[in-house]
Amino acid sequence: MPPRPENRHQARLLGLLRDNGPQSRAELGDGVHMSRSKLAIEVDRLTELGLVEPAGLAASRGGRRSGIVRLSPGMRFIGVDIGATSIDVAVTNGELEVLGHLTEQCDVRIGPEEVLDRVFALVDKLREVDPFPQVHGVGIGVPGPVSFREGMPVIPPIMPGWDRFPIRDVVGRRLGCPVLVDNDVNIMALGELHSGVARSIDDFLLIKIGTGIGCGIVVGGEIYRGVSGSAGDIGHIRLDDTGPMCVCGNAGCLEAYFSGAALAREARAVADSGASPFLVHRLADNGTLTGRDVADAAAAGDPAAVAIVREGGMRVGRVIAALVSFLNPGLLIIGGGVAGLGHPLLAEIRSVVYRQSLPLATGNLPIVLSELGGTAGVIGAARLISDHVLTAH
């Protein structure tokens, strides 16, 4: 197993170097409020462990120039974002800069063994470009409820065959390093916390709208997972007992009204009725319709597509409005594939949230689209495992 810090002082130093980049010993001492002699002992020990290395001298602060310290350039973390229809794998350095990123289409329903084989194949491809000798840790996100403590999905609605599959143990044995597994929305929230629009925000919500709908909850700079790890599963909040059937087996869930599959269903209905000339032609050309087609139709001003977006945004906005009144976050981020509907969707969600939530909760609440796009998940997965690896064992 790769080396890890031996005490909380070393862990704090590594965290500063990860988040802020190379720093002088004087700057590190200021950041951790540690005496010069104690700092020297801990930095020297981290150097012996191969976790940090010297990187020249800093500018003088009035006396002898302080040595610069940086994380070992050989440190590597792997971030894996397994979605319902795709896999993203990235390798980062210790500061979580993405050094390589690969993605491929993959249906999660083919089962854990084949999906993880594809993950390992992508890791091997990344190694061909950056032949790193050792992986210090792997973070993995999956599109379903996860027992964070056990590192496995638990009865995931859109992942048949994955129930209680030991992802953490299987990947850990294969790659010989620590592994953590979490819900895909949580890792996206961690990505936004580390390098996205939430970098300076300690309390925020990330709403992912894709094949499913989920909410990453960050409180005090930490992911809130709930007692069993299922916090934030807002896609299965029921809006109408007589609504369309959801993959979870209930009727009228938010996800059944406005997700990737629901958008495709609504698009096909308006195309079949002839209400949307744009979608009629797109269906004739492609033989099928997706959420992307709805976005294109709405951008072209197609009235039926605009109505689909507005109605979906209204339903999502009602659920979010309740969350905002309850949790009072400092920021709300909209991400995921359906967020590609863009500003028409964002405008509708904003309108409903600002109108229906308590004024005290929305008086200074930005509601924005994610700026990290497809990298939020892999960066967040790398952040997840680095938080674990850079903590004293």
Image (tube, rainbow, N blue to C red):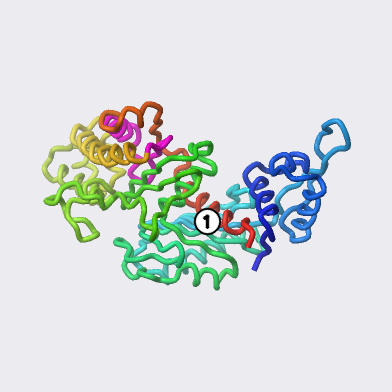
Q: Callout 1: few (<14), some (14-19), or many (20+) C-alpha neighbours within 10 Å?
A: many
Question: Measured from the top left, where is residue 9 in percent x and y?
Answer: 69, 52
| Left or right side of 390 for 285 | left
Question: Measured from the top left, where is residue 179 in percent x and y?
Answer: 53, 64
Is residue 333 a member of the stretch shown in magenta?
Answer: yes
Residue at x 32% of width, y 52% of height: 233
Closer to us: 281 or 110: 110
Residue at x 54% of width, y 69% of height: 172
Q: Can the viewer see residue 375?
A: no
Question: Measured from the top left, where is residue 67 in percent x and y?
Answer: 82, 43
In the rendered image, the quadrant that contains the N terminus is bottom right
> Under tag 1, what secondary structure?
strand
Instruction: Give the magenta-colored segment's residue range.
Output: 328-353
How many numbered marks have been drawn onto this rendered protein structure?
Answer: 1
What residue is shown with label 1? 79
Magenta stretch secondary structure, dominant? helix
